[in-house]
Amino acid sequence: MELAKELAARMNVDPSTIEEYFRQMAKLIEREISEKGEVAVPHLGRFERLTLPGGVRYDPQTRLPTMLPQTDTITFAPMIRARAYCSKVAQLNQCGVLHMF
């Protein structure tokens, strides 16, 4: 991981220390999202869980529709763009299209 190596060089620590810190932070963010649905991390931004709408898939042989289930996806929106991001998602949901960042 290039970022970990660069940070380790700047801080005069072992790169594995930085990588372990990133792993622990990712686990903590995932846990907070699973419990609360979103988490804000200072200087990084807001992470939230979006429920993507289910869809319809057509069987190529029978041409019968199959409903696909909704899925949860963890997304990241920088704090500065969080409002614009949420309004954009709302617009795309109204159109039936969801753009993934």
Image: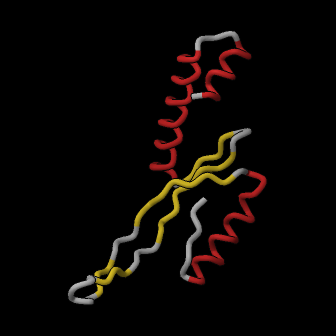
Q: Residue at x 52, y 57 (%)?
A: 49
Residue at the bottom extreme of this rendering: 63
Q: Residue at x 66, y 54 (%)?
A: 77
Residue at the front extreme of this rendering: 61
Q: Residue at x 50, y 29 (%)?
A: 24
Q: Give whichever of 37, 67 is nearer the camera.
A: 67
Q: Residue at x 47, y 68 (%)?
A: 52
Residue 31 versus residue 8 in the image, above or below: below
Q: How is the model colour-coded? A: secondary structure
Percent across and percent down for residue 43 are 74, 39
Q: Is residue 28 left or right of residue 94?
A: left
Q: Quadrant of residue 101?
A: bottom right
Residue 40 versus residue 87 in the image, above or below: above
Percent across and percent down for residue 90 are 63, 74
Percent across and percent down for residue 79 are 73, 51
Residue at the right extreme of this rendering: 80
Image quadrant containing the N terminus: top right
Q: How many numbered callouts? A: 0
Residue 25 versus residue 39 in the image, above or below: above
Q: Quadrant of residue 3?
A: top right
